Amino acid sequence: MNSEGHLEAVPIKKILDARTGKVVGWLYLWNNGEVAPMWIADEPTDEIFPSFSRQGPAEY
C-alpha cells in the first residue's frame, strides 16, 4: 500500500485471532480513504474482522 498522503488515521475495527478470539491488531482508516491493518506483533495468519453494528464501528 502506498503511504503517500497518510497524515491521520482512526481505528475502525478490531482484528481478532480466529482461534483464540484475542485482539491481534486494529484496522485503520486513513484520511486519504485507504484502510490498513496495524498488528500488535507479527502479522497473524488466521485473523477475522468482526462486522460493524448498525450503530457504527466496534469499540477498540
Image (cartoon, rainbow, N blue to C red):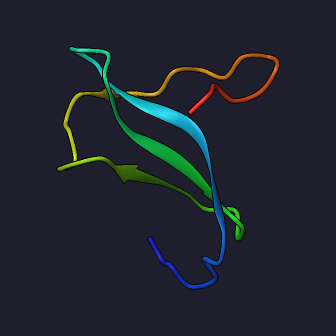
Q: Position of residue 56 (x, y in %)?
A: 77, 27
State the quadrant of the N terminus. bottom left
- Left or right of residue 48: residue 50: right
Residue 6 appears at what percent x and percent y? 60, 77
Q: Position of residue 10 (x, y in %)?
A: 65, 54
Position of 31 with respect to 14 (left or right) is right
Quadrant of the rendered structure where residue 54 is? top right
Residue 43 vertical placement versus 48 (above, below): below
Quadrant of the snapshot with the C terminus: top right
Residue located 56% across and 52% down the image: 28
Residue at 31% across / 22% down in the picture? 22
Decide which of 16, 51 is in the foreground and name it: 16
Q: Quadrant of residue 5?
A: bottom right
**Above-or-below relation of 44 to 22:** below
Residue at the bottom extreme of this rendering: 4
Residue at image coords 49%, 33%: 14
Asked which quadrant contains residue 18, the reply is top left
Seen from the viewer's position, the closer of residues 32 and 39 is: 39
- Please state if 5 lies on the left or on the right of 45 as rendered: right
